[in-house]
Each structure stands twice: as C-alpha cells, then as structure tokens.
Image: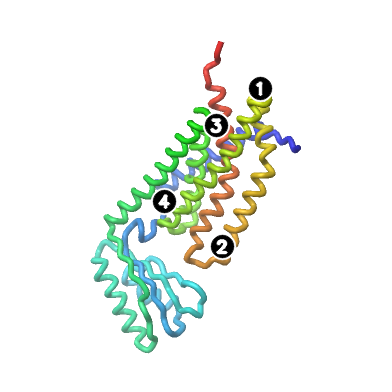
Amino acid sequence: MRNIDFVKLFKYFSLLSLALVIGTIVLFFTKGLNYGVDFRGGVEMQVKFEKTIDASVLRNQLDDLYLSQLQSIGEASQNEFLLKLDTDNMDLNVLSAKVEDVLKQNYADNKFEILKTDIVGPKAGEELRTSAFKAIAWAIIAIMIYLALRFDYKFAPGAVVALIHDIAIIIGVFIITEKEFSLQIVAALLAIIGYSVNDTVVIYDRVREVEQEHPGLSTFEVINRSINETMARTINTSLTTLGVSVVMLVWGGPVIHDFFFAMTVGLILGVYSTIFIAVPMTVLFEKLKPKTA
C-alpha cells in the first residue's frame, strides 16, 4: 500500500485554495458573472434556415436589436441558430417581433422557421436567479445535517467548506472565461455537489473505520491511512466519470458545452477538495475539540 503523507501537504493546498476563493470573491464583486437570458431576462429564439447563411452577416443585421449572443446549433449543414437578446429599453415581445421582421426583410429568398421563442422579463429573471442560489444553499445545508447525523459534528463542516470551495472556484472560472451562467450551470453545480459529497463520504467512512480498528493511531496517522487506502477507488471512479464528461464536452455540441465544462472542472475540484479541504477541516475540528479528563 502506498503511504503518501497528505497531512504534510494540507497547509500548502489550503493556502492555495484560500487564495483562489478570495480571488473569486474579488472578481464576483468587480467583474461579475455573465448571466444568461434565464437570469437577466431577455429573448431567446431558435431559427432554422433552408439555405446556408453567414453567421457574421446575421450578427451584424441584428446588432441594433440588442443581440448578446448568436450560436450555431448542431451541424453546420443544419443552418440552425440560437439568438439571445436582452434590453431594458424595449418591450421584449416587441423586440422578438422586430427580429422576425429583420429576418423577413433580409432572407426573403431563404425560407426560415422560428422553432421557438422564449421571453423572460427582467424581474422574473432576477427571481429565478435568487431561487437558483437558494436551491444550492439548501442543498448544502441538507448535506451538512445528513453528515452530522451519520458521522459526527466534526465531519459536517469539512464537507460543507469543500462544497462551497468547489462552487466558488467554478464560479470564478466562469467569470474569467466569460462563459454564460444559466440554469443549466446551476443544474451542473447541483450534480457536482452530489458527486463531491459522495467521494467525501467514502473517505469519511474509512476514517471512522480506521479509528475503530486502530484506536492507538494519532489523528494524522488515521487521516493518511484512510486517504491512501481509498486512493485507488477515488482515482478509478473519478477517471471514469471525468472521461465521460470530457467526451461530452468535446463532442457533445455547443448546446451542452457549458454544462459539461462546469462538470469537468467540478469533477476535478471534487477530488481535490475532498482530500485537501474536507479532510483537513476534520483535523482542525478534532484539534478544537475540548480535551476530556
């Protein structure tokens, strides 16, 4: 069995994670997230053309109509596009009608079909954004209660800090890359929360077993032994899941690209935070535990 001294590395990775989380907080309040139509309000239209068109020309034609994103969907031969527009200066229903008028004027000889039109008002978008972050918060609280009941109070905070760490850094990555933060990304975050806590529970289970089997071992020895003994399982499971996520990220198409981008980053962070955030927090709480006579 390998015997890597993870405890010795805890302080270095903890400082790295602290710096990354602080950086994310600074970016969040200075630059902010690039919210999708779901969260900021706007119009989303899916249009299919009969003949091939130049996306850059279409973008120029719609620039005056508050176009925020134009995205090709599927194969290039399908001639299908997703249009996202947002503004506070015009009624959104009027905006969608103007887009259709522009398409009729410029593509009279190229039959097109508007497959769907979704309109979200700014107020509804704000409420949806608030609800999404509440859902994440409630998921974390529920997990904290579950871990406290299943294990011991000293285990719950570590898992929660690790989850918050993962979510914060993913948000930071989305801010830096300026990728759109939408409902599907919230879904990805909730999936990552479930995956990450599952990995944490496996190591916590092993920590508890080693404590019972070897009561004479110090906390540091228990931690090192537990992580090393579960390392093979962690690597195999993570690589399998990560492989699927990377395949979908590369070949899944633009519609699900951001979802699997968040999943890929989250899967890597989940393993890292379990070992270098959740477990060290358990050590910290063990040190803070009042000594019994």
Amino acid type for the residue under numbered disc 1:
Pro
Amino acid type for the residue under numbered disc 3:
Met
Q: Residue furthest top?
A: 293
Query: Depth-wise, is mark 1 or mark 4 nearer the camera?
Result: 1
Question: Mark 2, residues whose alpha carbon is within 10 Å: few (<14), some, or many (≥20)?
Answer: some
Question: Mark 1, residues whose alpha carbon is within 10 Å: few (<14), some, or many (≥20)?
Answer: few
Residue at point 44% right, 40% down?
140
Residue 166 percent across, percent down from the top left: 51, 44
* Residue bearing the label numbered 3: 281
Q: Which quadrant of the rendered structure holds the C terminus?
A: top right
Q: Are marks 3 and 2 in contact (CB under 8 Å)?
A: no
Residue 180 percent across, percent down from the top left: 43, 59
Helix, strand or loop at mark 3 = helix
Q: Earlier in the sequence, mark 3 or mark 2?
A: 2
The alpha-carbon separation of the residues under discs 3 and 4 comes to 30 Å
The vertical placement of 146 against 105, above or below, is: above
Q: Is residue 199 left or right of residue 138?
A: right
The alpha-carbon separation of the residues under discs 2 and 1 comes to 46 Å
Is residue 159 visible to us here?
A: yes
Question: Mark 4, residues whose alpha carbon is within 10 Å: few (<14), some, or many (≥20)?
Answer: few
Q: Earlier in the sequence, mark 1 or mark 3?
A: 1
